Image (tube, rainbow, N blue to C red):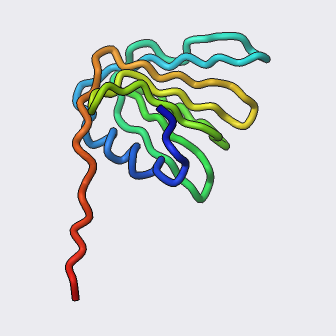
Amino acid sequence: MKIEKLQWRGYFDRVSKALVSKRAEIEVASLKLGDRIEAEWLPLLGISYDPKNDVIDIALEGLTHLINEPREVYVEQDGLELSALEVVDAEGSRQIVVLKDPLMLPAPAQSTKKAS
């Protein structure tokens, strides 16, 4: 499922809040560099998107993986269970984050605006 760019920040905030003792592997697939494992089953601490600098930051224990100029984000999700995500950057490289165990996401927050 594709996540639209306007939703990235909120989506990654929800994912980060649900991360408790989750381990992840990051694979980078690039025509220039081939496929390589960037991180292997490290504790995942958080994922964020900074729209000002146009960068996705994936924080793992002992490693920060930055994806500059991301163009597309896809998630492998069954209901509220997230098992993987893929980010395509400006050069067409695919950064694939696989969770060792699916992550149960919190339900999206409902708008709680009060009428004036």
Q: Quadrant of the C terminus?
A: bottom left
Residue at horizontal 68%, vertical 25%? 93
**Please, is residue 1 above or below residue 6 in the view?**
above
**Please, is residue 1 above or below residue 28 in the view?**
below
* Rendering coords of residue 5 (x, y %): 55, 49
- Count of residue discs: 0
* Rendering coords of residue 115 (x, y %): 21, 83
Residue sitting at the far right: 32
Residue at horizontal 34%, vertical 34%? 45
Residue at horizontal 33%, vertical 27%? 82
* Rendering coords of residue 60 (x, y %): 41, 29
* Rendering coords of residue 44 (x, y %): 36, 28
The image quadrant that residue 23 belongs to is top left
**Please, is residue 83 above or below residue 67 in the view?**
above
Q: Is residue 28 left or right of residue 91?
A: left
| Front-lying residue, 78 or 67 | 78
The image quadrant that residue 52 belongs to is bottom right
Residue at horizontal 45%, vertical 45%? 48
Q: Is residue 87 left or right of residue 31?
A: left
The image quadrant that residue 109 belongs to is bottom left
